[in-house]
Amino acid sequence: MKRLSQAVFLSMTALVLNVQAAAPDNASAQAGERAREIWHQQIEGGYQTLSEKAGEFAEHSRHWCADPATGSRSDVEQAWQQAFMAWQAVRFVDFGPIETDNRAWQLQFWPDPKNLIARKARYLLSADQAPTTDTIAGAGVAVQGFPMAEYLLFDEPFNRGDQALPAERSCQMLTAVASHIAANSEQQLSDWRAFEKHYIASEQYQDASVRAGMNALEILEERRLAQPMGLRGTGKRSAYVADAWRSGKSLATVEATVRGLKTHYLPGLELLLENSGQPGLADRIRGQFNEVLENFPALDTPMAPLLADDREFSRLQGLWVDVSQLTTLVNDQAAVAVGVVRGFNSSDGD
Amino acid sequence: MIPLSRRQLLKAGLAGGLAATLTGCSLLPRKTGTLPDQYTGAIGLPDGGFGVGAIDRHGHLLWQSPMASRGHSGCNRPGNQEVVFFERRPGRSFYVINAGTGARKHHIRAEAGEHFVGHGVFSPDGRWLYATGSRYEEGEGIVTVYDAENGYRRTNTFDLNGIGPHQLTLHADGDTLVIGLGGILTHPDYDRIKLNLPSMEPALILMNRKNGEIVGRFRPAHHHQSARHVDVSAGGKIYVAYQYQGPLHEMPPLLARVENGQLREYRFDDDTQAGLANYIASVIAHPENDLVAAASPVGGTAIVFEGASGKLVSKAGIPDCAGIQALAGGDFLISSGRGKLVRLGRDNRPLELASLPVYWDHHLV
């Protein structure tokens, strides 16, 4: 452990702190309200897409499971992917109705270091009673979202076994999970609409909104990329640490998240930056979003082969560097410019 | 939310170190209570590591002692040069440290199926250590008892009949443990997901420390007022601070004290409530007067109010403030995750006393 400097930093001069955060002046209060209007509208669009795509996924699952001979598995997989990517686009929103009943966790239980998804799936599939929507509703967050559906659709060992879809019991579970996802997505859209007046009237949600994007970028850089790439912790590369490894969509989710942030988050932030006299920074951030997105569709590929081959790995490093630069621009520079900080204690939760 | 990354800590550390000013001619004020000339707290280090650190009144680092993971709070052992620090929830262990040298004397691990939650308190004679904890498979809150005179051997376990205890302290009567029961069910396998928000039953619990009998259980007005932090004034007034689990735009009371057998809640003006951001990380009742201080790192606000009247007397914007110490003479010292130590008292003139290149993690003891 690095020893701290023994230097004394006492500053007993009468440095009086600003006793209260200065009340925002009229212009910045108006800009804040306008930013919240933009954010509300943009995010509503994202939830709308999620609700539609989740509904389609549920419908495709029902259809295929009702008659596997005429339905198409690849349609179900495709629908799962579209709904999951719609979720990635709004996954950054960590405040408001999405907090109700751990809805974000219900939609995507991750990380899952103990592989609860597989354990819970095996448990439910071997239970006396076939899983129903009620079973899923009462079975906890690991069962209720996209990763469980992904397990049923894409897990290789599972799909080599005799319970592989479209086996009846597994199909019952898939349709129940898909319908839970659809119900939650629809509820979230309706709750977000009802939340509008509070969101726009409460200044506190400005910080919450800016922080939401910062957190999402931090999680993206550190936990969704650096960790599987072995740049953190044990230093071991592991695709299993990333999300959506079963479907090989870890990197596609990165693209969807970045695209979602650009569409649903950036416009409100840009307005605040312009109001703070930082239009240049807003331009640089927009440019960096584009830099990140230029890695796609070339990198819309499973992560595991990229981790296994050093030459391929450098493509991943390129993406990580681009994401890091975006994170630095938003979390360090833009956050300071609009007066939002995340602290050691404030992000702890105890 | 996730903790700051190492990259950010490093950046913040460098910036903090460069920004610190050196005058070096003055002293930090004396604390009240045990070891009045020393401040000890869990710290985050600029290199991303964690430990416990103590400074003297010159602001000199007396020692630092490593911890395997992030710490939270601790307690000084009365009549003995020992300080105990707990790992952050879900804590797997606590450390017993020589308060004079920083040398580690014991490293006590939680028993199988249990974890600590970051807080403990000693009996007045320094023999028994009481620590809040959880049997996580069952979701049962417990108080565990350790014998400090026998190598911190586990001697007893008291059930709280509730979920999610956090801070505990000892009442001025010397016999009653005062415990904040957050009411929130979590499980180490599920990160920090709150598993029971609709059915939370938070409470302020009073427990006889000798036999574990629950002698009082007070419920906040709203079941989303998660009771986390507690303190007792010298005169025996019991205070509790909440972290509200409902939406940000609802701004219910966050502080209360026991009066006439129930919780009297304090609500301040909307600006102050907004500044507290539905989240209090510490509450301290001053042993020398009627003042009470509370700090919110989320809102970056610390306040001081009168216990009897509920009148707000001071408010300061201090980014990431969390720890509070009562100072000899009647004021408070607020510590922040940015290494600041700020004096705050009745005069509502916050004074920055020190800026250290260290991240004070929550509570100073």
Image (spheres, rainbow, N blue to C red):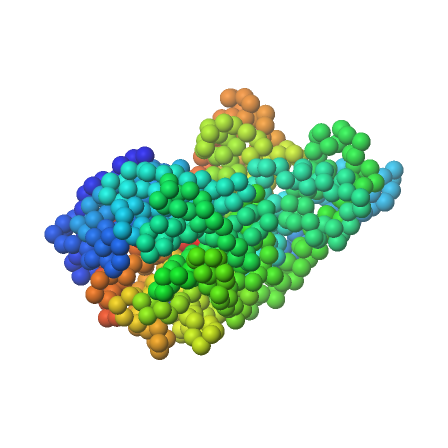
Question: A344 or B190: nearer the eye?
Answer: B190
Residue at the image point whose x is 37% and y is 70% from the top: B237
Location of residue B227 with respect to A212 vertically, above or below = below
- Residue B277 % position (x, y): 44, 63
Q: Residue at x 76, y 37 (%)?
A: A74
Location of residue A117 (image quadrant): top right
Q: Nearer the viewer, residue A318 or A340?
A: A340
Quadrant containing the N terminus of chain A is top left
> In the displayed structure, does residue A42 sit left or right of residue B344?
right
Q: Quarter-wise, where is residue B7 in the image?
A: top left
A16 versus B268 height, above or below: above
In the rendered view, tell whether residue B254 sits above or below residue A253.
Answer: below
Residue drawn at (87%, 42%) of the image: A67
Residue B68 percent across, percent down from the top left = 40, 37
Quarter containing the C terminus of chain A = bottom left
Percent position of residue A328, x then y: 40, 43
Looking at the picture, tell me which residue is in the foreground, A277 or A225: A225
Q: Is residue A10 above or below residue B293?
A: above
Residue B90 is situated, as x and y percent measured from the top left of the image, at 48, 46
Whether residue A60 is visible, yes or no, is: no
Residue found 44% across the figure and 67% down from its top: B254
